[in-house]
Image (cartoon, rainbow, N blue to C red):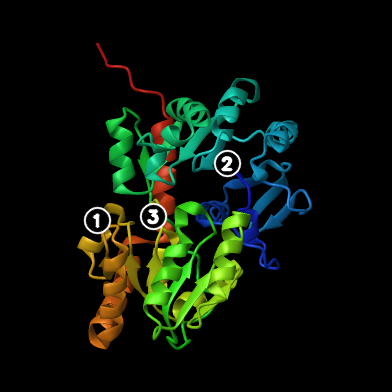
Amino acid sequence: MKILFLSSHAHLVLERSTSRVSGGAELQIALLAKELASRGIETIIAAGDTGQPDGMLHDGVRIRNAGKFQTGGLVDTLRALPHVASVINEERPDWVLLLGWTTWLFILHMMKPALGFRLGFICGLDTEVNGGFRRENPVRGLLFEHAMRRCDVRFAMTEDQRMLFHKNGMPCGFYRNLILPRAFERTSKKNIDLLWVSRCQPIKRPHLFLDLARKLPEAKCRMVCPREDAALWESVRSRAEAIPNLEFIERVPYHEIQAVYDSAKIFVNTSEWEGWPNSFIQSGLGEAALLSLDVNPDELFKRYALGRFCGGDPARMAEQAKSMLGSAGDLACMQKECARFVAEMHDNRKETDAFLAGLDKLSRPPQLPRG
């Protein structure tokens, strides 16, 4: 079997020499590709052009330069089309897979008859299945959903997503997020009270963390906020510089980020919505409790006493942060629970097995009834 992932920046996770970073979807593609390659499965990432040479090998995964499709711009997309098609034609994979919404799913769906691969989609966000993306982006959303319904295989990464797939008449496989392995043992002291880590996008609502830092001037806060939306990032950076108890960091490389989680007492999530955040897993690995404004995948906060869920209320978030920091005993219990949730729910070997089982089962032709 030969598997090709189309992913803009997943290669940056595997390329340990770089200081460039990207997001959770790319991290998951890189981790899955690495696990598949370790099992002897020929695995390729068709990556966006960030200046890397074509054909380099990282952890058994071959990285092909497929042009500047990662910018999302119409001109760059059109220019990248022949590059992407050429890479697929040269590699002749059995499967081409993508994680998360993108009109490239529709483009690949149109390429299938000529290039002879099977197409798979991995869900990153509930809005990809519940119609939210289509409502926000009518044209792109319609093309994306058209292709998603016609994929040869689909995967959910939360129980909520699996339910949405089946509710909308789309069979799917299921596996959970993989874990970025530790490069070192956890030794750092917990000298950060409140930590926020995410790309600078409107959906992540970074200004809400700045509001929280201002409301708790006695708390030591740290914000890791890689630039993406330039105007939003500039507004966040300039405002962060005026908050005395806040340390603002633009980026931390993947292989160094776990130490940042290790140093935090509480990880704060202010996103409007997410799928299953990688940041929750890394918080558990670092024994940091969770404080989430809106994100509660699969009722995680009811299943584990790992922090506080605020139901979308910023005032309650400030109250809960103060309460958590004010009780060292309760906070320590939450931190241990967060570590327990990761140990119980995430295992790279088991989740890769589940992915391969889904790929096999859902790609089989339906059995015709006998007689």
Q: Against 50, is 91 above or below? A: above
The residue under label 3 is which amino acid type? Trp
Residue extending farthest to the top is: 371
Could you tell me how far apart the alpha carbons at marks 3 and 1 are, in whole angstroms?
11 Å
The quadrant holding residue 285 is bottom left
Kind of residue indicated by mark 1: Glu
Write down the residue under mark 2. 3
Residue name at image x 48 percent, y 29 percent? 138
Residue 85 in the image, given as x and y percentages of width and height: 70, 31
**Mark closest to the chain's N terminus, 3 or 1:** 3
Gap in angstroms between the C-alphas marked 3 and 2: 24 Å
**Front-most of residues 345 and 260:** 260
Give the x, y percent position of residue 191.
45, 87
Q: Pointer 3: what residue?
A: 276
Q: Residue 68, located in which quarter of the rendered image?
A: top right
Which numbered disc flags the more N-terminal residue, 2 or 1?
2
